[in-house]
Image: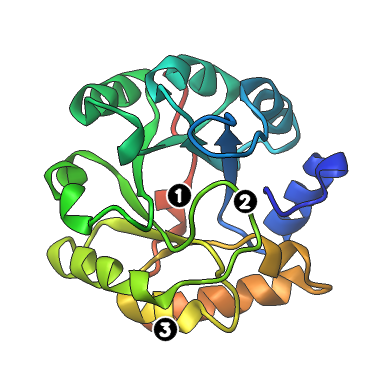
Amino acid sequence: MLASDLSCMAAEAQKVVAGGADYLHLDVMDGHFVPNITWGAPVIKHLRKHCPGVFFDCHMMVSNPEQWVEEIKDAGGDQYTFHLESTKDPAALIKQILASGMKVGIALRPGTPVKDVLPWVDLVDMVLIMTVEPGFGGQKFKADMMPKVTLLREKYPEKDIGVDGGLGPSTIEAAADAGANMIVAGSSVFKSPAPAQVIATLRRAVERLGNGKKEEELTPLPPA
């Protein structure tokens, strides 16, 4: 959603959902963990009113992610994706998120070795590999991050593995070939005159390689 026209965020969200998007990726930035500020729980809560039943993956690019778990849950978040680099106690944070009733995602910056996340993969629902430094949309895809995805897919064949940063029709094959099944695409979708076609292209690449998830696996969790 960071790449959408934020002056009409609800309409933009509805447009891509109608165009075939499985979920909305909401980048929460605090100006501290990353050098940008976006939105927080109040915006997500208002967006939820316009997108009932849509899966909200809240990508928390924030310092002290423990502080916002309950607020994001109350706002309508379905998955709380935190950065491994942002917390001193991943196990406690994972437990806190699960207790709230949300699914758990864990994200890695490009400079973080994939081995650092391995102790936590079994405890989370999704691992998100960043191909760009978090903070701003529109950055160029870095194919040299794909070995991380490949390693994770080999070790965890049933795990949701996401890729974020520079994904579009020209780069989707690299991510899909590596084993990604959750594709975060911003500029390539929202800046396109035919977003539904872009979404369909991304979906075909993932499903062709057998990494797609069944629709029911991406539905919102019931209220806690």
In the rendered image, is residue 3 in sight? yes
Lateral position of residue 193 relative to residue 82, left or right: right
In the image, what residue type sits under mark 2? Answer: Phe
Instruction: In the displayed orientation, state which residue is furthest to the right.
Output: 7
Separation of residues labelled 3 and 2 (CA atoms): 30 Å
- What quarter of the picture does the C terminus occupy? top left
- Residue at 78% x, 55% y: name it: 15
Residue 192 sits in quarter? bottom right
> Neighbour class for label 1 at 10 Å: few (<14), some, many (≥20)?
some
> Neighbour class for label 2 at 10 Å: few (<14), some, many (≥20)?
some
Residue 168 numbered mark, or none: none
> Neighbour class for label 3 at 10 Å: few (<14), some, many (≥20)?
few
Residue tagged by mark 1? Answer: 218
Q: What percent of the width, then of the height, locates residue 124? A: 26, 41
Number of callouts in the render?
3
Separation of residues labelled 2 and 1 (CA atoms): 26 Å
In the image, what residue type sits under mark 1? Answer: Leu
Indicate which label's residue lies in the foreground, 2 or 1: 2
Lateral position of residue 33 relative to residue 139, left or right: left
Q: What percent of the width, then of the height, locates residue 131? A: 44, 63
In the displayed structure, 142 sits above or below 111; it is below
- Residue at 49% x, 22% y: name it: 73
Residue 136 numbered mark, or none: 2
Q: What percent of the width, then of the height, locates residue 5? A: 82, 50
Q: Earlier in the sequence, mark 3 or mark 1?
A: 3
In the displayed structure, 64 sits above or below 139; it is above
Q: What percent of the width, then of the height, locates residue 79? A: 44, 37
Lateral position of residue 22 relative to residue 180, left or right: right
Q: Earlier in the sequence, mark 2 or mark 1?
A: 2
